[in-house]
Image (cartoon, rainbow, N blue to C red):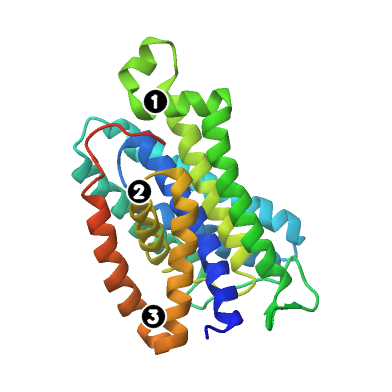
Amino acid sequence: MIPTQAIITGLMSGALYALLATGLIVAWHCARVINLAHGESYALAGLLASLLRQAGLPISVSVVAAICAAMALSLAVERLLLWPRRDWPASSLILVTLAAAFLSRGVLYVVAGVDPLSFPRMFAGRPWHFADGAWPRQGVALILGGLLASVGVVLFLRASEPGRRLRAVAENPDAAQLVGIDIRRARAIGFMIAGALGGLGAVLLVPLVSVDYQTGLAMTLRGFIAAALAGMSAPRAVLAGFALGLAEALVTWRFGALAQDPVVFLALIGLALWQGRRISFGGRGRA
């Protein structure tokens, strides 16, 4: 029988992957490029919140500043690197985002050093015990926050006027421009949403674990696997993210922590490649 604690761990990881996948999908629909620097928003937010807390700032100020910095980083990638090169082929733009990821990693290494960092939990106290498992309050906040934020973005895209404009840009930017939609502004909003989701995942998870300067690309990879499993669809990204987190937890429980990355990535990358056959990266799709 699968232990409850493994399921709890999988749900916490899955909430983060849902956030990362949703952000990656929103950015992809805006610019039609996989942003390999997406996970850097997670690393930046986690490290900055830790450093600001060490400097004596209140936890609320540290967390808000970290999320804003993640949004600024994502926006900078779009404004400074992708928008001026929007006529480049997608393969070249992917390399541009990869270069941005390594540049961000280098800056974080210089600023934060090599040691993993963390900060105190925002939701402290004794864990809740339910179904033979211990539910840490910070972990419950992560699960609920990840679920609500991911679903909230989907509702924003479907029900709000700015969200519908963003979807129109994703489906047909030329037609959207003809009806008066500011494509530049819509893309900026999309990338800021993506950065905010990555930053939110960091400030909710890092108090439970730790983060270092080289965490970003690993998070990008996990987010991409969940996004590909979801067929680059934001509504399905929530389920795909939680499925990925549970799969990792079950592999760790069955085979040990050292088997997690090779077993999970071998299986899920194969599934992602199979699912990716139905994704047209060169055309326009639905968010």
Q: Earlier in the sequence, mark 3 or mark 2?
A: 2
Q: Quadrant of residue 11?
A: bottom right
Determine whether label 1 and label 3 are within 8 Å by CB.
Answer: no
Q: Earlier in the sequence, mark 1 or mark 2?
A: 2
Q: Report which residue position mark 2 lands on.
A: 35
Q: What distance separates the C-alpha of mark 3 from that of mark 2?
A: 25 Å
Q: Residue at x 21, y 49 (%)?
A: 277
Residue neighbourhood size for the residue with mark 1, other residues' Cα within 10 Å, grouped as few (<14), some (14–19), many (≥20): many
Q: How many marks?
A: 3
User: Can you name the residue that lies furthest to the front here?
Assistant: 1
Q: Residue at x 69, y 80 (%)?
A: 134
Q: What type is the residue that disc 2 sits on? A: Asn
Q: Is residue 41 visible?
A: no
Instruction: For mark 1, give the secondary structure.
Output: helix
Q: Nearer the viewer, residue 181 or 78?
A: 181
> Residue 260 got which mark?
3
